[in-house]
Image (cartoon, helix red, strand yellow):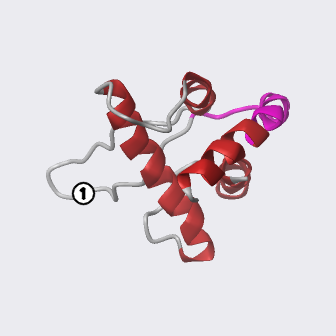
Amino acid sequence: ERLEELLHYKKEHGSCLVPSNYLPNIKLATWVKSQRRQYKLYQRKLSSNMSLVRIKVLEKHGFEWEVRSDSKKMFPECVISCTDIQESEADSDFDLIDELEEQDNEEGF
């Protein structure tokens, strides 16, 4: 569900830059933050709900695991940047959404 929302957000706004305080869909903003946290745990070989499938899907769409900042402005922790994707690529990923949702449900999201 959240991946679908992320791709819808990108289609609607022209980018995947989801602010941490995105009031129209705070669950999406929270999910993005959770993906980064789980990825960090996964990278450190600690207990994590992150999977290689999820990593590949998110990276395919340009998900950035580390949020960059400059000297004047700090980006919110759950801002992501995606490269442009074609709609047909997004459609092919929707069959993976069920797996991601199942993992989210196990995480309590």
Residue furthest to the bottom in view is: 23
18 w.r.t. 83: above or below: below
**Left or right of residue 89: residue 33:** left
Does the rendering let one see residue 57? yes
Does the rendering let one see residue 14? no
Q: Identify which residue is drawn at 45% across, 51% down.
A: 34
Q: Secondary structure at mark 1?
A: loop
Q: Image quarter for residue 58?
A: top right
x, y percent for residue 3 = 67, 46
**What's under tag 1, amino acid-wise?**
Met
x, y percent for residue 100 = 67, 40
Q: How many marks do you count on the picture?
A: 1
Q: Identify which residue is drawn at 70% across, 32% down.
A: 85
Q: Identify which residue is drawn at 24% across, 47% down.
A: 69
51 w.r.t. 37: above or below: above
Part of the protein shown in magenta: 83-97
Which residue position is annotated with label 1? 74
Q: Identify which residue is drawn at 34% across, 26% down.
A: 43
Residue furthest to the left in view is: 71
